[in-house]
Image: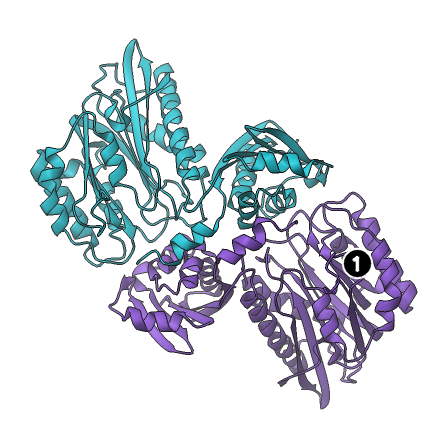
Chain colours: A cyan, B purple
């Protein structure tokens, strides 16, 4: 398996495009994305657990309840959430897409991201649809990746190639997500495509299981969005024998999926609103996965720890504090903590107490833009990784007046 | 019942002092506080639920296990937490206090606040004890209130007078707390004194029950400290009949306690690290207290909502989002939201959807330094209040390099 270029267009039979249609005032910012498969695809999606859900989530759930889809339409700039006419507008987005592409309206995945509680005008979407469809291309993933961005500063698209039963398969994904990132079950907006053949049931199983260790382990700010969604379409054009049971091919498919989602997760965490660095907490020695996971996520979510990372301050007391209130059942007198970056590793805490270390060396390590905090619970064999970012002035700035 | 001056020295028979002994480098900052009662007092305390606990917590728990205490010693600048010799040092603090005051070492409440994981040197405390005791005074609460401050910008001391069985009683409290504030069970450091006579059992009951609605409903940054403690000493010098059952006097005592703790909570929340304003979430119409509480706390803890408050942005979508992921069982289509300050009230959301409102008026209201966000769940009669502050550049600045 290896990473390749092409994003969601890397797999056979997927076209994409992204344009500025006018939902956003800034004319240089694309705000409408479309992905279309040449044939019907197995489809699966997972969604936010927030009780307040964006209208597109209800429509998408309904549309892919039969396990198939063929297109994805997504706008940025408006979340179409908490609006009285939300479901009507999201349904219209599917119908307009259907009319312009020939795909059935019931085979369209629809998503929206942006401000909550402002009615979404269908006019710019309807007016832009002709251009959007005319620009569809087999090498146009990047425009779609750009069109779904909100406060993101970098597009997020990855692809891998892998082999199933001698057939070369490909999988690609794009994502948006920068703030209001603390997924629960699903996350942000992620669209994955693959030309592998797989049944809808196993596609869902692979996606759900992957999300527990990938998207559900990211946190930018502890706020679970109303519009989180990860969707995947598998159109089977690679010609492999359809995966219908949990065999070796299914394992290979899951591995390819994990390669895509890990890259997307790291990209999302590193591009957290205002973030200057990616922070990953690697927990080992947990007595079970739940314990390791709870510890990792608590550290990554701590505002105090995140502010310390911004300041390149090896304040390991905040790591122990976050472990202590996580709710995980750990023996704090066994915990070791160290920090790692490309500049090396420094041990700062052993058996729950501080060890002497060079503040200068620690600073050098923590000034890098990708930091790992390693926590060994010394209580078993389970591991977990959580990903997030530092807490900065710019996070406050970006969110202090988001609506204007 | 009315508020009076005098802090922890307002009740009869309590002396206090606060000095700079040298734990902190800044010589203008007091760092050691002492409160002494003229006679043995009923005592109760509640503590952090963080698994990582400061050493003074273990010592205090042991010392007041018999329900009595007579003095309180507290340093700032070092939390005495995650240190191999922590319990030994905390015990020495009690012994030194005992030797200098004549109070039994087992009757001393000890507390520490500051950096985690740096050994606490007993020398400055031992050397400063003579001065600390010589400055004890019946009107010296303020110096003690100042000595327990860390990143606090304002001292927090309040007192009330009330009557039990015809006898005038008084109660006073001081608190510190600005960051790492998200109490669980207990909170921060709060020291309350009263000259009312009450049994240790009922004193604990009153304190525990009050904390659920006062301290446990504050959050500055979601981080539960390792050293949280609220303690109360009741020395009985008011001469009232000792409260030993849940009668009318107990209700009056609880009311006085709530008057003190509400003031302390508002002061702590408003002085949150970097905060420019106090933000209170008043939830009504809950089907039960747990639901109302969960909703109120989720809103107050949302980083996105807090950043919006900093920007005076009436972004009610973030309020609904935080309610939606709170875990509370609510009907989102029934929720009303409005904002209130001294400049008036503005309704922004009705039945879970936006209502047209004047952005100008909203800005005027939200630019004030005390904001109420009112959430009506329209699903019952239960209410709850949570308190916090806005998220600002200065929070990040203060915590980006706390240790230097």
- What residue lies at 52% left-to-right and 32% top-to-bottom? A384
Categorize mark 1 by other alpha carbons within 10 Å: few (<14), some (14-19), many (20+).
Answer: some
Left or right position of A304 against B376: right
Q: Which residue is mark 1?
A: B22
Q: How far across and how far down the image is residue A201, in percent?
A: 29, 28
Q: Position of residue A284 (x, y in %)?
A: 59, 30
Give residue A310's position: percent from left, percent from top. 53, 45
Residue at horizontal 77 percent and vertical 58 percent from the top: B60
Indicate whether A359 appears above or below B120: above
Q: Check disc 1 and report its element: helix, strand or loop.
A: loop
- In this rendered view, identify the residue nearer to me: A192 or A205: A192
Q: Quadrant of residue A134?
A: top left
Q: Residue at x 55, y 43 (%)?
A: A309
> Would you place residue B141 above or below residue A204 in this image?
below
Image x and y of residue B349, in percent: 30, 66
Q: Residue furthest top?
A: A166
């Amino acid at each position: 398996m290896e990473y390749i270029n092409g994003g969601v267009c890397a797999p056979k039979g997927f076209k994409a495009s992204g344009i500025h249609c006018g939902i956003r005032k800034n004319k240089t910012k694309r705000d409408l994305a479309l992905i279309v498969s040449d044939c019907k695809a197995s489809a699966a999606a997972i969604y936010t657990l927030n009780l307040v859900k964006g209208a597109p989530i209800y429509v998408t759930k309904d549309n892919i309840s039969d396990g198939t889809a063929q297109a994805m339409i997504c706008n940025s700039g408006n979340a179409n959430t908490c609006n009285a006419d939300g479901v009507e507008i999201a349904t219209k987005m599917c119908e307009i897409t259907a009319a312009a592409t020939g795909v059935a309206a019931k085979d369209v995945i629809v998503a929206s991201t942006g401000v909550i509680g402002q009615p979404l005008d269908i006019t710019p979407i309807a007016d832009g649809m002709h251009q959007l469809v005319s620009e569809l291309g087999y090498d146009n993933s990047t425009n779609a990746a750009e069109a779904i961005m909100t406060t993101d500063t970098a597009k997020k698209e990855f692809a891998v190639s892998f082999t199933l039963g001698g057939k070369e398969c490909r999988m690609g994904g794009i994502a948006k997500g920068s703030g209001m990132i603390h997924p629960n079950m699903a996350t942000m907006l992620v669209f994955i495509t693959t030309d592998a053949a797989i049944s809808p049931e196993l596609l869902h199983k692979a996606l759900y299981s992957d999300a527990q260790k990938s998207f559900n382990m990211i946190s930018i700010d502890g706020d679970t969005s109303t519009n989180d969604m990860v969707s995947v379409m598998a159109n089977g054009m690679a010609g492999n024998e359809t995966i219908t049971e949990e065999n070796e091919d299914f394992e290979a498919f899951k591995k390819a999926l994990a390669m895509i989602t890990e890259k997307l997760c790291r990209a999302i965490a590193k591009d957290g609103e205002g973030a200057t660095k990616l922070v990953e907490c690697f927990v080992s020695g947990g007595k079970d996965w739940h314990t390791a996971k709870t510890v990792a996520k608590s550290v990554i979510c701590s505002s105090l720890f995140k502010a310390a990372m911004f300041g390149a301050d090896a304040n390991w007391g905040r790591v122990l504090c976050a472990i202590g209130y996580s709710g995980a059942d750990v023996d704090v007198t066994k915990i070791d903590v160290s920090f790692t970056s490309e500049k090396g590793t420094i041990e700062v805490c052993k058996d729950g107490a501080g060890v002497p270390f060079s503040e200068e060396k620690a600073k050098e390590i923590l000034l890098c833009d990708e930091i790992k905090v390693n926590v060994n619970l010394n209580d078993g064999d389970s591991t977990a990784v959580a990903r997030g970012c530092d807490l900065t002035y710019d996070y406050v700035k970006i969110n202090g007046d988001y609506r204007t």
